[in-house]
Image (tube, helix red, strand yellow):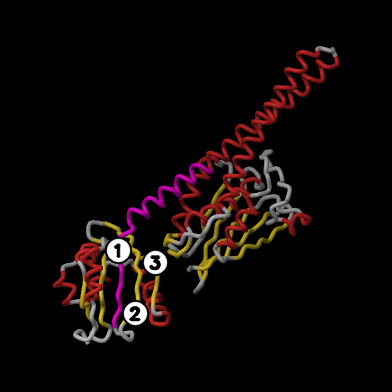
Amino acid sequence: MNGQFDYSFIKRVGDLTGDGVVVYDTSEKKFIYANDNFLNIFEVRHETLSADTKTVLQYVFTEDMEYLIARSKELFTTGALNTTEFRLKLPGDVTKHLSCDVMVTENSNMITAFVKDVSKTKKHEDFLIKYTAQKDIMLDMLTHNLSGPLQLSKDVMASMQKGHNENNISDVSKLIYIMQENTQQCIDIVNDFLREEHFESSLTYVRKTRFDVIDKINIMLVKLTEINKDKKFVLQSELKSLNINSDAVKFFQIIHNLLSNSIKFTQTDGKIEIRVSEEKDFYLIEIADDGVGIPHEVHPLLFNQRIQGRMGLKGEPSKGLGLFIAGQLVKLMSGEIWFKTTVNSGSTFFVKLPKE
């Protein structure tokens, strides 16, 4: 079979590319070609690879191995797979993130794989997610800490203006009016900035990468707990990790928007629970609070862009876009979102997302 299969073109590509390239003969159960980049990625020698084809799998994460087995079955049905991500745990506690494109050739006997080391890309993505978390929390703090005082200042000036008008002090009244308008502009700028920042994110495409759902939720909870010390956050799951292939940034935005909503409508000393469970083809996240619940008349409009936002229990302003954006992002990711609520007893939001 080796003599019949001409892999000279693949070899030329393998000699030129910076990616790992390998050809595997399924009938002989051995590699017939592997370029130097492939050997370097897996930190294996050519003679070792030739002697034991399974040596490239010895460092694959256990949960990722199950994923690779499922993908391999799909390979022989479709003939090709794109962007299959998995991780290696190498000696010295070194973790590598790899992405692999695979195709079946030569009457399904030959498999050609192109492997990229995307470890730096994953680190950059993790940085962006953490940065986004910090940025969103900063924006929330900006809204809570700035809009309130500005609104109060506006009300005080309105009272002053009323008093001065009664005394016919026209010049002072005009100045106070200007101050009122300027203060309102500040409030509008803050709210519009938040609205545009979150709304634009719901219109972008889905960029799938492999990430750990549990890890991303923990990142959010650490940050949210820092600025909401009056509430208790609990993550409940039988899973220690849940690695899925989806859009990590959009996942963060969905969960952050739902948590922010629960925070607004949960009293001091209230409890917010995040529950994560897994089925064969999807995973489910529940965000439950013991807050004031959602009025019945709002239910049909909750994920509607035109809904009038409800003011939070601490007077937090709202444009009513947080849940709308969460709903749009869930749809973009081919998922489902729904809720259950009881007035004065809290609400639970459910997010069902596919693993692929």
Of residue 167 and residue 315, the one placed in the foreground of this image is 167
Q: Mark 2 and mark 1: span between their CA atoms?
A: 24 Å
Q: Mark 3 and mark 2: span between their CA atoms?
A: 15 Å
Residue 93 in picture, x, y percent from top left? 26, 57
Crowding at label 3, few (<14), some or many (≥20) Cα neighbours within 10 Å?
some
Asked which quadrant contains residue 98, the reply is bottom left
Q: Amino acid at mark 1?
A: Leu
Reading the image, the residue beneath label 1 is 88
Position of residue 187 relative to residue 201, above or below, is: above
> In percent of the image, x 35 and y 64: which residue is there?
99
Residue 205 vs residue 322: left or right?
Answer: left
Q: Is residue 301 magenta?
A: no
> In percent of the image, x 50 and y 73: which residue is there?
281
Residue 30 in picture, x, y percent from top left? 22, 80
| Image quadrant in which the N terminus is located | bottom left
Residue 118 in picture, x, y percent from top left? 33, 58
Q: Mark 3 or 1 closer to N-term?
A: 3
Reading the image, the residue beneath label 2 is 104
> In percent of the image, x 59 and y 57: which residue is there?
287
Q: Secondary structure at mark 3?
A: strand
Q: Mark 2 or 1 closer to N-term?
A: 1
Q: Amino acid at mark 2?
A: Val
Q: Secondary structure at mark 2?
A: strand
Reading the image, the residue beneath label 3 is 83
Q: Main secondary structure of the magenta part?
A: helix
Residue 138 vs residue 269: left or right?
Answer: left
Q: Secondary structure at mark 1?
A: strand
Q: Which residues are magenta?
A: 110-136
Task: Give the number of the mark in front: 3 or 2.
Answer: 2
Q: Amino acid at mark 3?
A: Thr
Task: Give the number of the mark in front: 3 or 1.
Answer: 3
